[in-house]
Image: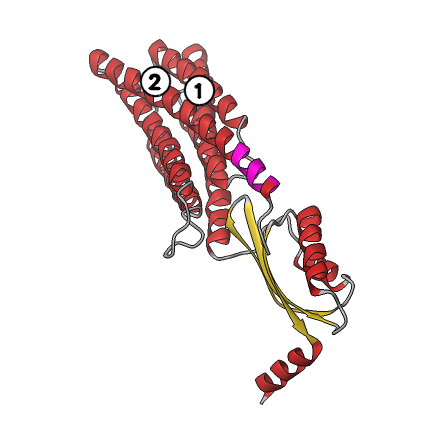
């Protein structure tokens, strides 16, 4: 079965949009991180330096996703017959894992602060507000990409969203401490953010493992696809059917179709290709057509 040209064109368009979104997000985050780090060193502000560290984790996640997307564009070879597309899933897996570690670290820090709530200066509010503005801009840029279907881009977006929520939490806590002297608000806000970051991390982590384990894409029903294949004219049975993802937006499938002897096999393959593309958005498939007699001989051999 051949590839479909329109699928490649559409995929390339998405890929370009995603790469552009990641590139500009990385530039914004990395630039702000440098400014914050210099500001922290000049003013001897630990709050500024720790926030710069937070931004560094975002910049690293975005940089890794961008690098993975660039590597993924490398062509196929005799050794890598699918190319490097799955490198994007490895990046998403790593980003999901770091989201989980960051959430655990936030909880660890928050528990310490419950017993010794920090004093918050107006400068902290200024930093958090600036950080929030930068994260809103970056989140908006990333949302223009394909965050729904591209796991790599979604993992980078969740990193930024976690930081954005952290900024909202810091501003809320800062205002409560500044006006009402509620020092306990800081660790409480941190805990809430940690839970949200943890949930996001778990989702990306397990979604990437699912792809790496050759799991079936979520939007495709195994039983429905098998029924559709069996309903095709001349098809008697379907066996050895496999559905998996090369990367998050590149589903693939393979199967054997047992057919009647009088069927036009070329026409059947063409109909199968169209059905898979139209109903299940699968443009990469390998179909083996088997005659009824050959199927029965093959299965009898397996029984003996």
Q: Please, is residue 289 above or below residue 200 in the view?
A: below
Image quarter hosting the C terminus: bottom right
Number of marks present in the image shown: 2
- The residue positioned 61% from the left and 40% from the top of the image is 6
Residue nearest the viewer, comparing 100 with 156: 156
Q: Please, is residue 131 above or below residue 159 in the view?
A: above
Residues in magenta, as a range: 6-14
Residue 296 image offset from top left, x and y in percent: 67, 82
Q: Can residue 188 be seen? A: no
Taking the magenta stretch, the answer to whether it contains residue 9 is: yes
Residue 55 image offset from top left, x and y in percent: 35, 25
- Judging by the rendered image, the residue that carries numbered circle 1 is 173
Image quarter hosting the N terminus: bottom right
Is label 1 or label 2 in front?
Answer: 2
Please tell me whether mark 1 sits on a helix, a strand or a loop.
Answer: helix
Q: Can residue 286 be seen? A: yes
Q: Main secondary structure of the magenta part?
A: helix
The residue at the far bottom in this view is 304
- Judging by the rendered image, the residue that carries numbered circle 2 is 32
Residue 227 image offset from top left, x and y in percent: 74, 61
């Amino acid at each position: 079965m051949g590839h479909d040209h329109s699928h490649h064109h559409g995929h390339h368009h998405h890929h370009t949009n995603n790469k552009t979104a990641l590139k500009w997000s990385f530039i914004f985050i990395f630039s702000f991180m440098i400014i914050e780090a210099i500001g922290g060193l000049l003013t001897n502000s630990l709050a500024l330096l720790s926030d710069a560290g937070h931004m560094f984790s975002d910049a690293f996640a975005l940089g890794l996703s961008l690098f993975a997307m660039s590597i993924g564009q490398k062509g196929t070879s005799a050794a890598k017959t699918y190319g490097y597309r799955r490198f994007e899933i490895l990046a998403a897996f790593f980003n999901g894992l770091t989201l989980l570690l960051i959430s655990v670290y936030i909880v660890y820090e928050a528990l310490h602060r419950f017993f010794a709530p920090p004093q918050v200066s107006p400068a902290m509010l200024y930093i958090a507000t600036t950080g929030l503005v930068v994260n809103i801009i970056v989140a908006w840029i990333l949302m223009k990409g394909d965050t729904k279907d591209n796991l790599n881009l979604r993992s980078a977006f969740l990193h930024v969203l976690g930081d954005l929520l952290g900024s909202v939490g810091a501003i809320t806590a800062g205002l409560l401490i500044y006006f009402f002297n509620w020092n306990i608000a800081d660790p409480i806000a941190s805990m809430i953010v940690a839970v949200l970051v943890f949930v996001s991390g778990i989702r990306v982590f397990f979604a990437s493992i699912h792809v790496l384990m050759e799991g079936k894409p979520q939007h495709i029903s195994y039983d429905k696809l098998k029924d559709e294949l069996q309903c095709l004219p001349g098809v008697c049975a379907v066996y050895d059917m496999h559905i998996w993802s090369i990367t998050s937006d590149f589903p693939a499938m393979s199967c054997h179709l047992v057919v009647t002897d009088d069927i036009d096999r070329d026409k059947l393959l063409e109909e199968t290709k169209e059905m898979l593309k139209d109903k299940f958005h699968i443009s990469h498939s390998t179909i083996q057509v088997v005659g009824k007699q050959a199927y029965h001989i093959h299965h009898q051999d397996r029984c003996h």
